[in-house]
């Protein structure tokens, strides 16, 4: 069965991007390349979902080749209310509206592989509201922004979330939470 996972980085004060939708803060602390978590986790991902702002940031900072560089040949579903440039020869669907039909389409297509919710937080919140979110994986970085795009702009209480794992990796803490439905 397809597991829906929100895998992202956030600041100590709970933001995934600053007020200008920049992720520059993320690169202030080096990534620990020897951690190996990504190499264990990413092969289970069959497809990705992201919002328009995340997609535009990826294109702006990595260019059209960044999809294959970061995600390989995995298909993507991009939620948007505006016209966005496609990436030639990449399997991307521009979608809008309710997340449930998009999830159903992705799950049918992925054949049991996991669906990565790349961001943003409000889109992930919509998956949660629809009862589709299974897991949250956060790499918390010792940076505070004071404002920006929140990790999850929803009230989700501990009745719905359970810590599964926490690990210090260099100057980051990886936190894995299960989502109870």
Image (cartoon, rainbow, N blue to C red):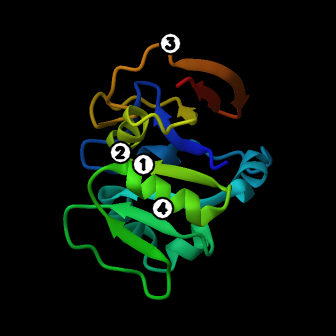
- Secondary element under disc 1, as helix, strand or loop, is strand
Count of numbered circles on the image: 4
- Secondary element under disc 2, as helix, strand or loop, is helix
The residue at which mark 2 appears reads as: 123
Query: Between residues 44 and 3, which one lies in front from this camera angle?
Result: 3
The residue at which mark 1 appears reads as: 119
- Check contact, mark 3 vs mark 1: CB within 8 A: no
Residue at x 49%, y 87% (from the top left corner): 89
Crowdedness near tag 3: few (<14), some (14–19) or many (≥20) residues, C-alpha within 10 Å: few
Look at the picture and state if 162 lies above or below 14: above
Look at the picture and state if 67 lies above or below 25: below
Q: Is residue 93 left or right of residue 175?
A: left
Residue 1 percent coordinates (x, y):
67, 48
The residue at which mark 4 appears reads as: 105
Residue at x 30%, y 27% (from the top left corner): 146
Residue 107 percent coordinates (x, y):
56, 57
- Check contact, mark 4 vs mark 1: CB within 8 A: no
Earlier along the polypeptide chain: callout 2 or callout 4?
Answer: 4
Earlier along the polypeptide chain: callout 3 or callout 1?
Answer: 1
Residue 145 percent coordinates (x, y):
34, 32
CA–CA distance in space, label 4 to label 1: 19 Å
Look at the picture and state if 168 lies above or below 118: above
Query: Between residues 64 and 7, which one lies in front from this camera angle?
Result: 7
CA–CA distance in space, label 2 to label 1: 7 Å
Residue 30 percent coordinates (x, y):
62, 46
- Check contact, mark 3 vs mark 2: CB within 8 A: no
Mark 3 or 1, closer to the camera? 3
The residue at which mark 3 appears reads as: 158
């Amino acid at each position: 069965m397809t597991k829906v996972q929100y895998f992202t980085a956030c600041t100590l004060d709970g933001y995934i991007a600053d007020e200008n939708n920049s992720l520059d803060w993320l690169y202030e602390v080096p990534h620990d390349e020897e951690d190996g978590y990504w190499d264990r986790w990413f092969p289970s991902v069959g497809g990705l979902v992201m919002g328009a702002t995340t997609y535009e940031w990826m294109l702006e900072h990595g260019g059209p080749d960044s999809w294959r560089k970061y995600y390989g040949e995995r298909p993507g579903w991009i939620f948007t209310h505006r016209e966005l440039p496609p990436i030639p020869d990449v399997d991307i669907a521009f979608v809008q509206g309710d997340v449930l039909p998009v999830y159903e389409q992705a799950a049918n297509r992925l054949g049991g592989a996991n669906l990565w919710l790349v961001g943003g937080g409000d889109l992930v919140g919509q998956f949660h509201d629809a009862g589709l979110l299974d897991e949250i994986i956060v790499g918390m970085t010792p940076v505070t922004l004071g404002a920006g795009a929140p990790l999850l702009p929803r009230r989700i209480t501990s009745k719905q979330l359970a810590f599964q794992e926490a690990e210090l990796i260099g100057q980051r803490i990886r936190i894995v939470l299960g989502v109870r439905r």
